[in-house]
C-alpha cells in the first residue's frame, strides 16, 4: 500500500477484521483543506474536536473557523473517528471524555475541552455502537 512517498506492507497469517481496520486507518487523511474567506486553510484532523452547522456555514472547534458547506458533504471527507451526533453536529471520538444522560432523553457528550455536545436520540444507537467497538 502506498501512502504519499511511503510504501507500507502488511503481513498477516489471515486477512481478518484487524487487518482490514489497519488498512482503513493507514488510508485515512491527516489533514484537510477548506476555503475560508477566499483563502485555503489546512486543518489538522487530530486537532479538530467538533463541527457545528450554523445556517449555511460550518464552524470548526476549537479553531473557530467558519466556512460555507453542508455537514453531510463535509462528513464524507473525515476519517472514521468522526461521527454525527445530531442533525447539526459531528464530533471527533478521540476527544470524547464521557457521555451523560440529559433530561430530554438525549445524551450529553463531554469533550476533553469541557465543551458539552448534545447527542440526539436518533443518533445515539450509532454513537453507542462506535464507542463500544
Image: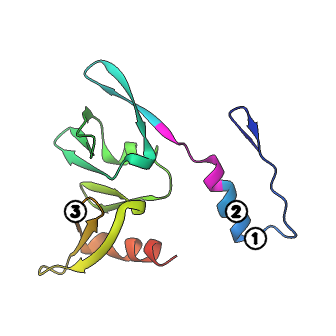
Which circle's residue, 3 or 2, is located before the other in the chain? 2
The answer to whether residue 29 is magenta is yes
Question: In the rendered view, does 28 fall on the left or right side of 41?
Answer: right
- x, y percent for residue 111: 29, 63
- Rendered position, 79 above or below 63: below
Whether residue 86 is in magenta: the answer is no
Q: Secondary structure at mark 1?
A: loop
Q: Which residues are magenta?
A: 24-31
Residue that extends furthest to the front in the rendered view of this protein: 113
Can you give x and y, in whole percent of width and height, for residue 14 in the image? 84, 70
Q: Callout 2: few (<14), some (14-19), or many (20+) C-alpha neighbours within 10 Å? A: few
In the rendered structure, the answer to whether residue 13 lies left or right of residue 17 reads right
Q: Are marks 2 and 1 in contact (CB under 8 Å)?
A: yes
- Reading the chain from its start, which is encountered first: label 3 or label 1? 1
**3D distance between C-alphas at marks 2 and 1:** 6 Å
Residue tagged 1:
16
As displayed, is residue 97 above or below residue 41?
A: below
Q: Return the x and y of residue 126 as percentages of the image width and height.
A: 40, 72
Q: Are marks 3 and 1 in contact (CB under 8 Å)?
A: no
Between the C-alphas of marks 3 and 2, the distance is 34 Å
Q: Secondary structure at mark 2?
A: helix
For disc 3, the marked residue is 114
- Judge from the rendering whether residue 118 lies leftward or rightward of residue 42; answer left or right: left
Picture mark count:
3
In the picture, the disc for residue 20 is 2
Q: Nearer the viewer, mark 3 or mark 2?
A: 3
Q: Are marks 3 and 2 in contact (CB under 8 Å)?
A: no
Amino acid at each position: 500500500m502506498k501512502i504519499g512517498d511511503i510504501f507500507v506492507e502488511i503481513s498477516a497469517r489471515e486477512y481478518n477484521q484487524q487487518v482490514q481496520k489497519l488498512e482503513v486507518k493507514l488510508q485515512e487523511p491527516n489533514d484537510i483543506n477548506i476555503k475560508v474567506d477566499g483563502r485555503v486553510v489546512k486543518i489538522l484532523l487530530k486537532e479538530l474536536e467538533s463541527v457545528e452547522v450554523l445556517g449555511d456555514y460550518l464552524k470548526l472547534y476549537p479553531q473557530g473557523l467558519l466556512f460555507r458547506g453542508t455537514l453531510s458533504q463535509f462528513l464524507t471527507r473525515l476519517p472514521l473517528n468522526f461521527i454525527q451526533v445530531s442533525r447539526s453536529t459531528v464530533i471527533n471520538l478521540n476527544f470524547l471524555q464521557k457521555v451523560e444522560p440529559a433530561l430530554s432523553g438525549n445524551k450529553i457528550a463531554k469533550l476533553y475541552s469541557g465543551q458539552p455536545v448534545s447527542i440526539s436520540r436518533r443518533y445515539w444507537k450509532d454513537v453507542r455502537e462506535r464507542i463500544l467497538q
